[in-house]
Amino acid sequence: MIRTRFAPSPNGPLHLGHAYAAIVAHDRARASGGEFLLRIEDIDGARSRPELAQEHVEDLQWLGLNWDGPIVRQSSRLADYADAANRLKTMGLLYPCQCTRADVLAAAKMEGPDGPIYPGTCRGRDVDPVGAAWRLDMARATAHAGALAWRDELAGEQAARSEIFGDVVLVRKDAPASYHLAATLDDATDGITLVTRGRDLFAATHVHRLLQALLGLPVPVWHHHLLLVEESSRKLAKRRGSGQGGLGLAEMRRSGSDGPALAADLRAGRLPTGISLGRGLDIRA
């Protein structure tokens, strides 16, 4: 049975891009008689706002989407993230890092999918772990896991290439887990068999596949769909959402717009003027 999920972060209003992503996950599950779950990713420090989480729930209900089982909140799983991080520390695969973003930008010599690649400044050093971030020693981790592969429904079989990210942060200074660690653990705990998300996260799957191997987690199939973009080909963003001609879902809902009709338009590719489905990244193997 296929099980999918939609996992918004309550740090800003949902927009049409989120609606499209939620519909893809919802419809992919429903078409096969599977299950669709809702998870609130609410561990982003002070940026996570409970009132926005409730707003997101109401937005999805307004669109006519329904989910199976109770809503899951990441904030209820902090012990799971700590346990996983401790396992990786015991394996000698994590190390503390006190570098700031400015330090990384100043020292980096290569670009990766998420920007400048961390040059390993704190790797092998005696660093005070108090208040530190914890990074994955990518060379050790990939040597430990060996060759790995994963499959995307649209792009086919992929060889995992997590080394393109360098030593990623798994435990942040300001949060109990990074997106990479939390999302990977959550999908395993929730029994997700098909991870649907935008193509902007395609490369992140290389890291997630590595973490699955290191932690002995099940391996789902992925489906990286196209993104809704503006005329400039810039993807929609929460920080601009409600300012783009009223594209914030809550604003549209409160104005009396028809949610199911909007969902039907998104399914049919009928998009507002100035918004289109971008070509996205080339995700061929």
Image (spheres, grey):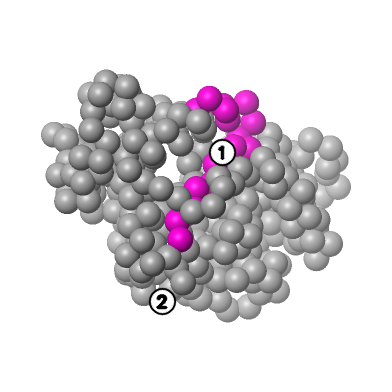
Coordinates of residue 282 in the picture (x, y in percent): 30, 61
At label 2, which amino acid type do we have?
Glu
Magenta segment boundaries in residue numbering: 35-52
Q: Which mark is residue 168?
A: none
The reply to whether discs 2 and 1 touch (Cβ–Cβ < 8 Å) is: no
Q: Secondary structure at mark 1?
A: helix
> Is residue 46 a member of the stretch shown in magenta?
yes
Observer-nearest of 157 and 241:
241
Q: Secondary structure at mark 2?
A: strand
Reading the image, the residue beneath label 2 is 157
Coordinates of residue 276 in the picture (x, y in percent): 19, 43
Q: Residue at x 32, y 22 (%)?
A: 254
Coordinates of residue 207 in the picture (x, y in percent): 56, 61
Tell me if residue 85 comes above or below residue 252 in the rendering. Answer: below
Q: Residue at x 62, y 51 (%)?
A: 182
Q: Residue at x 63, y 78 (%)?
A: 146
Judge left or right: residue 4 versus residue 89: left
> Is residue 98 a member of the stretch shown in magenta?
no
Tell me if residue 132 comes above or below residue 21 in the rendering. Answer: above
Observer-nearest of 224 and 107:
224
Q: Quadrant of residue 47?
A: top right
